[in-house]
Image (cartoon, rainbow, N blue to C red):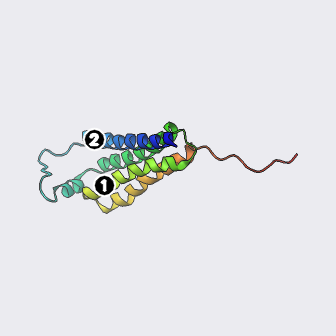
Amino acid sequence: MLRAFWGIIAGGVAGIVTMMILESAGDLVFPMPLAADLSKAGASLSYLDQMPAGAKAIILMGWAGASYLASALALRLGHSKNPRVGWAAGAAVFLAGVLSLAMIPHPWWMWAVGLPALTLPAWFAARQLAPKPADMRRQTP
């Protein structure tokens, strides 16, 4: 139980750090214009409107990758057979992504694509990596 708890913590932290790294990698590939002043009200929204589609795709792929990584790592480090361990670590990444969406105004379609990108990979990883319960039926000779 304690090992699963630490697996969830490690998976969640690794997922959030991965999300931040991949978002920063997107900033390197698609740098912000030098004239952009994000201290003004509404400047971040206008920047996001002008951001290339590739930069937004990198953000979404980073969220999906971080969600999968968090779930997979939690299951592996926690040595757990329960997919809920993976889902819990994925929930930490989900909350970080929703905070990002809420704090920085994103277009509506980023919400529509981002929420599944934050949830489905964690679900898939937990389903894929958690051992399946053995068949409980008795075999008759």
Please report whichever mark, 1 or 2, sits nearer to the chain's N-terminal start.
2
x and y percentages locating residue 15 in the rendered image:
39, 43
Which residue is outermost to the front? 2
Residue 24 disc label: 2
* Mark 2 crowdedness (10 Å alpha carbons): few <14, some 14-19, many ≥20: some
x and y percentages locating residue 86 in the rendered image:
49, 47
Q: Of the residues shown, which amino acid type is indicated by label 1?
A: Leu
Q: Quadrant of the C terminus?
A: top right
User: Residue, x 37% and y 45% (percent of image)?
Assistant: 62
> Which residue in the structure is indicated by mark 1?
99
What secondary structure is marked by label 1?
Answer: helix
Q: Of the residues shown, which amino acid type is indicated by label 2?
A: Ser
User: Residue, x 29% and y 39% (percent of image)?
Assistant: 25
Q: In whole angstroms, how far apart are the C-alphas of marks 1 and 2?
A: 17 Å
User: Residue, x 55% and y 42% (percent of image)?
Assistant: 80
* Mark 1 crowdedness (10 Å alpha carbons): few <14, some 14-19, many ≥20: few
x and y percentages locating residue 17 in the rendered image:
34, 40
